[in-house]
Image (cartoon, rainbow, N blue to C red):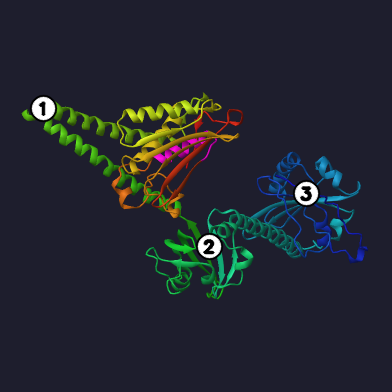
Amino acid sequence: MTRTTTTMHSANRTPQRVDPFDVLLAHATLMVDSQGCVLDLAPQRGAPEGIILGWGMPQSDARQFVGWLRGKLDREARGPYAIVPIPMEQWPTSLARLGAPNDGEAVAIHLADGVGSLGWMACVGMAGMAARLPLASPRQRAAFIGQLVAQVRATLEARALREQRDQLDSIFRFSGDGILTVDAALRVTACNPALEQLIAWRAGEMLGRFYYDVLRTEDLHGEPLGLARCPLVEAFASAAPVVAREIIIRTRDGQRLNVAVTAAAVYSEEGQVASGVLNVRDVSHQHAQEVLASNVVSVVSHELQTPIAIIKGYAATLGRPETMRDPVALRERLGAIEEEADRLSHMVSNLLYASRIQAGGLSMEVAPLDVGAVLASSVRRFRARGVRHQLRLHCPDNLPLVLADRERIEEVVANLLDNAIKYAPQSRSIHIAGHFTGEAMIVSVSDNGPGIPLREQARVFDRFERVDGDLTRRANGAGLGLYICQAIVRAHGGQIWVESEVGVGSTFSFSLPRMERAAVPMVVGARI
C-alpha cells in the first residue's frame, strides 16, 4: 500500500530564514488514517521547497505505532488541535533511522477539521524544532494546525482529482464504444480510438472540424437527420441526455452502420452549454442477427412447407382404391414420399450442422485420405439417385493423400454437387475435377447455371444466404449448404471460393493442404 520515498529533505537554509511550518512538513515521515493505513501523499505542485510528504515507515511499524498513538491521543489530547511529543523509547526503529541526532525531537499531530479526522502525522526534526514552532497559545496552535490541515487536505483532494482524471482517461481510451466530444459550436475537440476505427477517420483529421462534416447521420429510413434532429443539438436544447437512440451513420468510406447513440451536454458554472459528449455503440452486428433470425424463420418455414405438403398429398391418395389397384401409381407416390422425406432429412441435418458449427462443437476424425476416391464415390451415389444431369469426373490417378475427415469432405462434395444440380439446367453437364498443385489439393465443381453477380459472391457462404433471381428463388434450399462447406474446409486449414459469370455458370472450388503441411483441429471451432 505504501510507496516509500526519501523524506529527509531538510533544506540547508540559514536558521533565521527557516519557516517552522516548512521545517515540520520537511521532516514528516508518516501519515496514517484513523484505521492505521498509511496514506501516500505526493508533494503538491507549487508547495514550498522541502514539503515532501513521503513515508519511510513500513506498514507493520505504522500499525504498531498508530496503536500506541491512538491511546496516547485519547488520554492526552482533546479536539482537533493536538500536538503530542513522542518519547524516544516509543520511536519505531524505522522512524528513528529517519530522525535527527539523539537530541532530536519528534511529535505526533492529530489532523482534523470540521469535516472530520484526516489521521495523524508523525514528524521528526532538528534539535529544538518544537521550540521554534509558534505554539505558545491555543490560538497559535489552532492556526498552525489549520494551516497544516489545509495543506494535507489539498494534497488529498489533488490526488483524488488525479486518480479521477486518470480513470476517465482510461475509460475514454479503452472503451469499446466510440466517444466524441465537441465544444458549444459543435466543433470536434476529441475522439477515442474506438470511434476512429468505427468511422475510418483519424483523430487528428477530425479535431476542429464541424461535427456534421465528420459524422453523417440518418434515421432508420435513410433520411438525413440534419442539424435539427442531431442528437447533440437535441441534448443542448433539452438539457437532458438523449439516451440509446438508434440511428444510421455513414463512415468515411461510405459504409452505413446501425448505431445506438447517447448524447449529453456539459454545462459551465454559469449554466451555459460548454461542450457535449456523444457515445456511439455499433449495433450493426446485433441488427444483422435480428434480420438473420427473421430470415431463419421465414426460410425454414417455407422450405418445410413444400415437402410436407407433397408428403401429405401423396399419403392422402394411397388409401384410395384406384391407387391400390395401380402398382405403377403406388410406386410413384411412395417414391415421391421417400424423396421428400430425404429432402426433409437433409434439411434437418444441415440445420444441425450449422448449429454445431456455430457452437464450436463439430468433432472431426482425421486420417490420410484419397480425395480422388471420395470424388468417384460421390459421383456414383449421385448417378444412382437418377439425376438428370451428366456428371463428368476429371481426376488423375495416384493423387497425393491429404489429412482430413472423410465424412466431412464427403459432406462438402455432396453440398457442392447438390448446389450445381439445383441451379444447372437439366440434361446439361456438371464437371467435377481434382488436381494437385504441389502445395494443396484443389477440388472444383462447375455448372452452367444462371451465375452469381460479383456483388453477391462474397455473401454466398453466409448462413441462410441465397442469390437473388427468378431461377434461384424457384430452387429449394435453406441457404446452409455453402456455409457448412466453408466451415468444414476452413477447419481443415483450406480455403473455399467461387468464380462465376452471370449467364455462363459458376465454379466452386476448395483446397486442402498436402498431408505434410496439414494442421487440423479435432473440433471445429469456427464461428463464421
- The residue type indicated by label 2 comes to Asp
Q: Secondary structure at mark 1?
A: loop
- For the residue pair 331 and 57, the one nearer the viewer reads as 331
* Residue at figure coordinates x 56%, y 69% from the top left: 182
Crowd around label 3: few <14 · some 14–19 · many ≥20 (10 Å): many
- Asked where in the image residue 199 lies, by quadrant, the reply is bottom right
Find the magenta span and give its range: 481-495
Crowd around label 1: few <14 · some 14–19 · many ≥20 (10 Å): few
Q: Is residue 221 visible?
A: yes
Crowd around label 2: few <14 · some 14–19 · many ≥20 (10 Å): few
Mark 3 or mark 1, whichever is nearer to me: 1
In reply to whether residue 493 is colored magenta, the answer given is yes
Q: Secondary structure at mark 3?
A: loop
The spot of residue 209 in percent (x, y) is 58, 72
Residue behind mark 2 = 253
Picture layout, residue 212 above or below residue 285:
below
Q: Residue furthest right?
A: 14
Mark 2 or mark 1, whichever is nearer to me: 1
Marks 2 and 3, the one that precedes in the sequence: 3
- For the residue pair 253 and 120, the one nearer the viewer reads as 253
In reply to whether residue 393 is colored magenta, the answer given is no
The spot of residue 506 in percent (x, y) is 42, 45
- The residue type indicated by label 1 comes to Asp
Q: Which mark is residue 55?
A: 3
Residue behind mark 1 = 326
- Asked where in the image residue 245 lies, by quadrant, the reply is bottom left
Picture layout, residue 386 above or below residue 165:
above
Q: Residue furthest left?
A: 321
The spot of residue 438 in percent (x, y) is 60, 34
Instruction: Give the distance between the C-alpha atoms of the residues marked 2 and 3, in whole angstroms.
Output: 56 Å
